[in-house]
Amino acid sequence: MTERQKRKQRKSWRKNSQKYRQKKKMLANILSNSPPDSENEIEIDNSLSRKRSGTKLFKKDKAQAYRTVKKQKDKIQKMQRIIDKLRKKVQRNRRREERVSQKNADTPTRKVNELTRECSVTPEIRKRLLFGEVL
């Protein structure tokens, strides 16, 4: 096709599409302005409006459920953080208690120190007492 023929073809396409759109609009206007033929059409219109309102309610309920679930998940995460924090605190306290109990435990050195606290003893005797206490 030459350029002239192409332009002519495009022009005819534009005219045809304009006619098609005008016919479509006129048909829609006629159908919307005309009264319904029977009760059946009225029922169909009512069912469509009910369906639309039902979908609106469904979307609204779904959105609310989503928000509720999100709030609950945030609450659960917050509680989980608190639980983890308290668990760590208990763990630290237990370690501290173990260290304190180990300090108070009767070790051979402590026993020897208690025995020799009141009297002066040479380091050699202290060593022998300690080894005797260990065995």
Image (cartoon, rainbow, N blue to C red):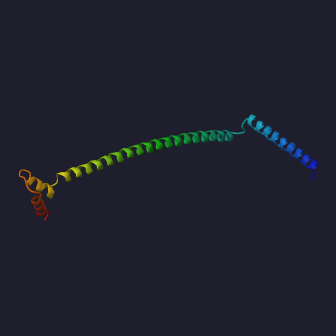
What's the residue at 33%, 48% (across, down)?
88
The vertical placement of 89 against 110, above or below, is above
In the picture provided, is 85 more to the left or to the right than 98? right
The residue depicted at 14 percent of the width and 54 percent of the height is 110
Q: Quadrant of residue 38?
A: top right
Nearer to us in this view, 21 or 85: 85
Q: Is residue 72 left or right of residue 95?
A: right
Residue 60, how many percent across, how many down? 54, 39
Residue in the picture at 79% in, 38% down: 25
Residue in front for this viewpoint, 49 or 25: 25
Relative image position of residue 65 (x, y in whole percent)? 49, 42
Using the image, determine if residue 100 lies above or below residue 30: below
Which residue is drawn at the image coordinates 57% and 41% (left, top)? 54
Residue nearer the viewer, 129 or 59: 129
Specify the farthest residue to the left: 119
List x then y, in percent, for residue 67. Answer: 49, 41
Please tell me in which quadrant of the rendered image residue 41 appears.
top right
Q: Quadrant of the C terminus?
A: bottom left
| Residue 53 coordinates in the image, percent (x, y) | 59, 39
Horizontal relation, residue 100 to residue 6: left or right: left
Q: How many marks?
A: 0
Tell me the quarter of the picture where residue 46 sits.
Answer: top right
